[in-house]
Image (cartoon, rainbow, N blue to C red):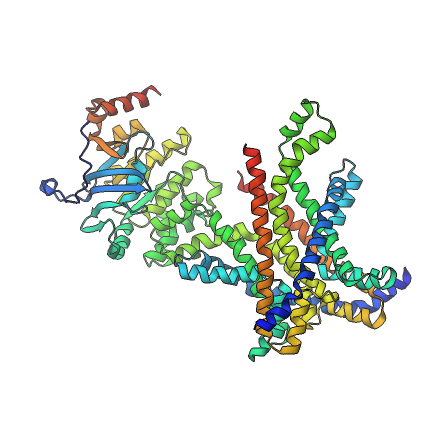
Amino acid sequence: MSSVSPVSTAAPSVIKVQKTEQAFLSLKGLHKSFGPYEVLHDVSLEMHKGEVLAIIGPSGSGKSTLLRCINQLSPPTAGSVSMDGVTIEAGCSSSRNDLVKLRRRIGMVFQSFNLFPHLTVLQNVSLAQVRTMGRSKRDADKKSLELLDRVGLANKAELYPARCSGGQQQRIAIARALALEPELMLFDEPTSALDPELGLEVLAVMKELANEGMSMIMVTHEMHFAETVSDRVVVMAEGRILEQGISREVMRNPQHERVVQFLRAVRDR
Amino acid sequence: MFDVFKAMLDGVPWTIAVTLLSFTIGCLLGFPICWLRMSPFRVISFATASLVLIIRSIPPIVWLFFVFFGAGGGLLNLSPIAAAVTGLGIITAAQMSEVYRGALSAVPVGQYEAAHVLNLNARQRFVDIILPQMLRIVVPSAATYAISLLKDSAVASTIGVTDISAVAYQVTQQTFKGIEVYTTAALLYLLLSVPVALFSRWLGATLNTRISK
Amino acid sequence: MNELLGLWWEWFPDLLQGFFLSLQVTGVCLLLGIPLGLVFALGVSAPNKAVRLIFLFVVELGRGAPALILLQYFYYGLPSAGITFSSFTAAALALAYCTGAYTSEIIRGGLEAVASGQREAADVIGLNKLDALRFIIVPQALRIAIPSLLGFSIIMFQASSLCFTIALPELVSRASAIGSNTFQYMPVLALAGIMYAVVCIPATIIVTSLEKKLGASSQT
């Protein structure tokens, strides 16, 4: 077990910044506890612009929590999140302004879509553009239609979400997130609530997005997708990162015993 | 302020009496109404359902006037409190029959079937199996209704029962301290509802622990 | 029987005026009271503890006091502080407060029933708290609350009969006046009762079926 020492000295490690290129996103020493339960334990991670990261691991390993810590949907108990110059330190209430700045640049797609059921598909995609980006309704709708067209659903614009299949709803959710022109997209098990067949159409959209150079972090159970689409795979268990590296290498030749076990269990399914 | 409070206390026993008596009548009368409502004969159950709906669709004050001035004045000569208790008792019975019906239908069908399979007779099936489960569901709704009945009992003041509301009106006319008087009245009603809520919580907890044991 | 119908025919125009006034009071109190209920509901779930306690007190007082006491408070009580209302204004304000207190609980239930994912989604697309409430949470909460709000409106229509005690010439006042003039209490009260029932019975049936329909659809 090569676990990091649990002593949480909030020391920002100087050694890690020795890379040639400044990291686009960097998480340092993230901890997250819900009451007495520590869900994340000293997680540090860096990624470059345009990189596609897949986070895998057994359920309850803290993958989704990590994602939610990145956009501060559930703020970490300790540690910091930096993205392109904006840094949010846990526990600092002063960075409210920075929080908005950070959020604005990160899009998120949920496992359960979370479309707004009382708004049409078009309104779902347009609302935030009008309210937070100051776009006129006409410009917003135009942009929304372009995005809906891109995910193959322009013909559903006037329907309510309930009239669309799960796969369609998730593609709409992706369009909604893209409408705000994010620099980083977070996907929280985007296909877990879908039948495999419907999941494929969502994965196709995600793959296209990755090919266009979008920076993406996804929590997923789709091992094949993780291996073929992502640049790097991060394996988590019990709130820690066990192993990370080039997707193919981690998937084919894992080093850590716990990871070998996990991958075997998933493949045998 | 203290004088006002003391004068107001005179109304409390009447408010309690009207509430308790009409609640008791309603709880008892609710059973036969519920039984008729669930009759296998469509005519009977429909007629009962219609009656319950009619009773609930006419304001309490109209029922009280009807009993007091109508029946009381012409035929029976009821005292104000008797009229109030009769009128509110009938309304409560209609409400409680619905509470009972809801509770009965909330007991899973499997419980009836199991009681049958055990060869219990009709009385045993009801008293030993269904009733205890039903009560657990009835208690909270009955308590909520009792509290709203306590407040509805204020209409008894309109036919001359000297309850809290009636006293409030009298004292206001005499002292012109309307704000103190009506604030006291509101607080008295609030205070009276507290024991009902506590009792219901205690009873609910007792019934629940008996089930979980 | 003919005699009864004759009396009813004679009284009906007078009672009808009272009936419309009852409807009017109910309409005004709902129009003021339901928005007030929304404000109360938001106040009771405010993040600030002091604000929450104040709203909780206001709501509990409105729910704990009989509507009759509230009406008389506004009509007989406030004049001792130099505030005088016409019986219509007193009725509208008192019943609006009552409506606000009761509907705040209904609306709060609706707010809580909106899935937590909706808040999160509003959050990640960058809507601020107020926009999230206005465009996402409140519209859905009200939609959930509609059957209960309609059911409550029927109760308020019946409660408007209490305005009799503050000399508002609504349906019960007029019926009781006719009764005391003619001593024909039974027939006039029966007619008044029928007029309430004509509104409340169909309304209750509609609300019940609406509740069933929405209850069934929300389970899928």
At a point 24% along the width and 25% down the height, the residue shown is: A251
Q: Tell which of B150 and A204 is nearer to you.
A: B150
At a point 83% along the width and 60% down the height, the residue shown is: B71
Outermost bottom residue: C82
The x and y percentages for residue C59 are: 52, 60
- Quadrant housing residue C94: bottom right
| In this rendering, position of residue B137 left or right of residue A117 | right
The x and y percentages for residue A221 are: 33, 30
| In this rendering, position of residue A67 left or right of residue C130 | left
Residue C89 appears in the figure: no
Residue B122 appears in the figure: yes
The x and y percentages for residue A9 are: 16, 43
| In this rendering, position of residue A114 left or right of residue A82 | right
For residue A150, above or below residue B78: above
At a point 75% along the width and 65% down the height, the residue shown is: B159
- Quadrant housing residue C131: bottom left
Quadrant (top left/top right/bottom left/bottom right) for the C terminus of chain A: top left
Quadrant (top left/top right/bottom left/bottom right) for the N terminus of chain A: top left
Q: Tell which of A191 and A97 is nearer to you.
A: A97
Q: Tell which of B211 and C122 is nearer to you.
A: B211
Outermost right residue: C2
The x and y percentages for residue C122 are: 38, 50
For residue A69, above or below residue B180: above
For residue C51, above or below residue B122: below
- Quadrant housing residue B65: bottom right
Q: Tell which of A228 and B89 is nearer to you.
A: B89
| Marker count (numbered) | 0
At a point 36% along the width and 36% down the height, the residue shown is: A190
